[in-house]
Image (cartoon, rainbow, N blue to C red):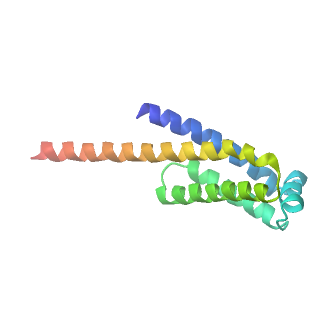
Amino acid sequence: MKKTNIFYWVFTGLFAFLMLGSAIPDIMSHPVAIQGMHVELGYPKFFVPFIGVAKLLGVIAILVPGFPRIKEWAYAGLFFDLIGATYSILAIGKPDWMFMVLPLGLATASYVFYQRRKRLQQDRIGNQQTAVLSTAF
């Protein structure tokens, strides 16, 4: 359980750092974010801060303990964002899509270790309940 926790927090921390780093310029409608999303990719300007706030909320959701259903939706939303960004970059013919392997890999590792950690916690709770029931009888 200890190794799983360490891997989970390392991958989740790196993933959250990357996503937060991309959310802040979007929220502030920084010229670099406008250049990339509006000028190069063709998305409307109002979409830039919207996607930034969505990423920020997703980062908060994956870092806050508990709330497993919200965490699942947050992972899904962040994956959709990354896959959509990768496809958008590919669609305009930029070679930058290769750099999307890093955030997608971190997202995958974070989610895999989140699932392992959740399963181990559920197993531990189940074992504790079984032990309590067996001592009661």
Residue 87 lies, with reference to residue 4, above or below; the image says: below
Question: What percent of the width, then of the height, locates residue 48?
Answer: 80, 61
The residue shown at (51%, 33%) is: 6
Residue 132 lies, with reference to residue 37, above or below; the image says: above
- Please state if 127 lies on the left or on the right of 43 as rendered: left
* In-front residue for pair 33/100: 100
- In which quadrant of the rendered image does the N terminus lie? top left
- Please state if 8 lies on the left or on the right of 92 as rendered: left
Location of residue 90 (image quadrant) = bottom right
As drawn, the residue found furthest toward the front would be 93
Question: What percent of the width, then of the height, locates residue 129?
Answer: 24, 47
The residue shown at (55%, 38%) is: 9
Location of residue 91 (image quadrant) = bottom right
As drawn, the residue found furthest toward the left would be 137
Question: What percent of the width, then of the height, locates residue 89?
Answer: 78, 55
The residue shown at (55%, 44%) is: 110
